[in-house]
Image: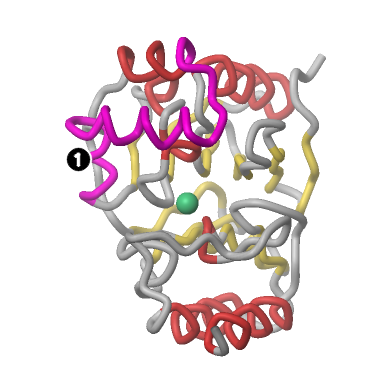
Amino acid sequence: MAALIWERISEHVIRCRLPFCDVTVGAVHADGSALVVDTGTTLSEAHAVAHDIAELTGCTVRHVVLTHNHFDHILGHSVFAAATTFCAPEVVTALAERHAWLRADAVTHGADPVEVDAALAAAVPPRYAQAAGNLTLAEDVTVRIVHPGRGHTDHDLVVLVADGPHTVVFCGDLVEESGDPCVDDQSDPAAWPATLDRLAALGGPGARYVPGHGAVVDAAFVHRQARWLAAR
Ligand SMILES: [Zn+2]
């Protein structure tokens, strides 16, 4: 039985909203291989994700995308350390060196310090880090990993999935639905609206956009969030 609640977005794409921080973890699966998008805060969350993907898809996780260096997206990474990881250099640095920063941010947001320490003790820098790329999981299931521009951070990656006739875009925290977009000292509010317009152009008007936090939205929502940020 699945440990988490998963939502099927298209034939080969699923995602769950982790109870802690409502973080999206996504999976694209085909022909025995799966790609995971973000890994949660704790090892127990990441192990639950790994368990469920194996059970629901029968696929082996061979690729991981870490969208940006915030704790709630990367601290579960070590559970998938055998997979090829796509992420920005800033994520590699965080997992290798910035443990005090990750810990403080996680605990401030309510994470269990014992679980955070366990995740940090297990942390390994991604061994095959690339910041962009293309993957073909099956003839009609292809993935593009793209940095569309500065916004929530200066290094956000998005994952564009072409699943037969359907397009799914994992937006990381460039798009949030369950709360306002999170602007902090890594953000670039001036550049963010144009980045979102580029993101909507990459996915197209018919795509389903999966926020880093919150319910799946459409291209019109992405454009509205761009205007909201521009008006701040
Ligand atoms: Zn974030």
Q: Residue at x 69, y 72 (%)?
A: 207
Residue 38: percent from left, percent from top: 50, 41
- Residue at figure coordinates x 72%, y 67% from the top left: 208
State the quadrant of the C terminus: bottom right
Residue 22 shows in the view: yes
Task: Report if residue 63 is visible in the image.
Answer: no
Placement of the N terminus among the 4 image quadrants: top right
Q: Is residue 29 left or right of residue 101?
A: right
In front: 77, or 213?
213
| Residue shown at 34% from the left, 60% from the top | 185
At numbered mark 1, what does the secondary structure look like: helix, strand or loop? Answer: helix
Type of amino acid at the residue the image marks with label 1: Thr
Residue at horizontal 44 percent and vertical 78 percent from the top = 192
User: Foreground residue, 17 or 11?
Assistant: 17
Residue bounds of the magenta highlight: 89-115
Foreground: 175 or 60?
175
Residue at label 1?
Answer: 93
Quadrant hosting residue 180: bottom right
